[in-house]
Image (cartoon, helix red, strand yellow):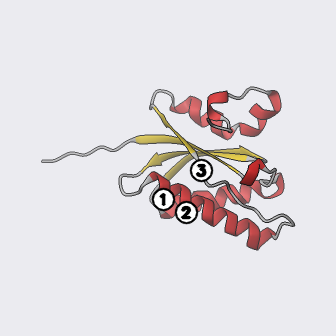
Amino acid sequence: MSHKKFEVFVHLIWSTRNRERLLLREYREDVFSVIVSKCRDLETDVLAIGGVEDHLHVLVLLPPTQALMDIVKHAKGVSSHFVNHHFKPEVPFAWQSGYAAFSVSQKDLPKAVDYVRNQETRHGEGKTVSRYEPPFE
C-alpha cells in the first residue's frame, strides 16, 4: 500500500504597490477574510494572516494540488478587486508584482504563527525580524 504525506508550511509576504500605505486598518480584516476564503477555495489552509499598511504576511499549509505562485496570484487578485469595488478608495488599491516565500519547519510553526498574527504590534514596538520584512534584496 502506498502512503503519502505532504506537509509544507510557507510564510508568504507581499507589499502594496510602491509600498504605499494602502492596506488601511478600516478594511484590513475584510481583506484578510477575502484572502482566507480564496485560499480555502484553492484547498490551502491559512494558519495565520497579518499585516500593516504597506505589506501583508500569510502563513499557509501548501497543498500538493496547487502551485505556490498560483495561490499568491489568486489571493492578490481577489483582495485588490475586493478593496477597489467594495470600498472604492480614492487611490486605487494594488499589490506589487513580487512576493517572498520562506519555508517554516513544524518545530518553528508556533513562532511563525505568532509573528504573522502580531504584525501591527511588532511594527509598533520595532520588534520585527528584518529577514521577513520588505523590501527584500
Disc 2 marks which residue? 74
- Look at the numbered disc 1 and give the secondary structure of its residue: helix
53 with respect to 46 (left or right): right
Residue under the point 77% across and 34% down: 123
Labelled pair 2, 1 in contact (Cβ < 8 Å):
yes
As drawn, the residue found furthest toward the right would be: 90
Residue 105 position in % (x across, y down) = 45, 31
Disc 3 marks which residue? 98
Q: Amino acid at mark 2?
A: His
* Label of residue 70 in the image: 1
- Look at the numbered disc 2 and give the secondary structure of its residue: helix
66 with respect to 110 (left or right): left
Cα–Cα gap, marks 3 and 2: 13 Å
> Which of the two discs, 1 and 3, labels the residue nearer the N terminus?
1
Image quadrant in which you'd find residue 33: bottom right
Cα–Cα gap, marks 2 and 1: 6 Å
69 with respect to 28 (left or right): left
Total numbered labels: 3
Residue under the point 67% across and 55% down: 32
Query: Would you call the spot at circle 2 few (<14 residues within 10 Å), some (14-19), or many (20 or more)?
Result: some
> Which of the two discs, 3 and 2, labels the residue nearer the N terminus?
2
Q: Amino acid at mark 3?
A: Gly
Q: Amino acid at mark 1?
A: Asp
Residue under the point 58% across and 47% down: 99
Query: Would you call the spot at circle 1 few (<14 residues within 10 Å), some (14-19), or many (20 or more)?
Result: few
Return the residue nearer the eye: 57 or 54. Answer: 54
Image quadrant in which you'd find residue 89: bottom right
